[in-house]
Image (spheres, rainbow, N blue to C red):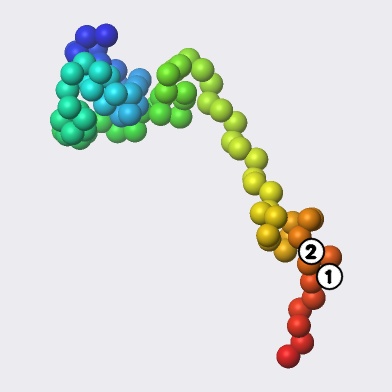
Amino acid sequence: MSEEELIDAYEAGRISRRIFVRKLVAGGLSFSAAVAYSNALGAGPAAASTLHPDHPDHPPHPPHPPHPPHPTHPDHPNHPDHHTWRRRAG
């Protein structure tokens, strides 16, 4: 991908800022210069930013399920006070 194609893809939202900066750095630009360049272009959030960064045609991953309570949390089934916890009076 040429520099012009890279800029066009970034400004059109076909690639994310992360991919844009990554490709600039891979092309020999320093990281700080690549970030400054992406800021100067001022492109909005890319439509591809929710897609897998290495495979833009891949659909987004489903959300992760909630984590179970930590074993030291009273709501965890293995916690010693899980079934015996009572609010103390007073």
Quadrant location of the C terminus in the rendered image: bottom right
Give the residue at x 76% y 60%: 79
User: Which x, y percent locates residue 89?
Assistant: 77, 87
Give the residue at x 69% y 49%: 68
Quarter of the view holding residue 4? top left
**Residue 33's mark?**
none
User: Which x, y percent locates residue 41?
Assistant: 18, 29
User: Which x, y percent locates residue 85?
Assistant: 79, 71
Quadrant location of the N terminus in the rendered image: top left
Local crowd at mark 2 within 10 Å, few (<14), some, or many (≥20)? some
Question: Left of 8 or right of it: where is 51?
Answer: right
Quarter of the view holding residue 8? top left
Q: Is residue 43 above or below residue 78?
A: above
Please state which amino acid type lies under the numbered disc 1: Thr
Is the residue under label 2 in contact with that under label 1 (CB below 8 Å)? yes
Number of callouts in the render? 2
Q: Which residue is mark 1?
A: 84
Please state which amino acid type lies under the numbered disc 2: Pro
Task: Label 2, secondary structure: give it.
Answer: loop
Q: Is residue 70 above or below residue 11?
A: below
Q: Which residue is mark 2?
A: 80
The residue at the far top in this view is 1
From where the camera sits, is residue 41 visible? no
Give the residue at x 29% y 24%: 22
Question: Left of 48 or right of it: where is 11?
Answer: left
Give the residue at x 51% y 17%: 58
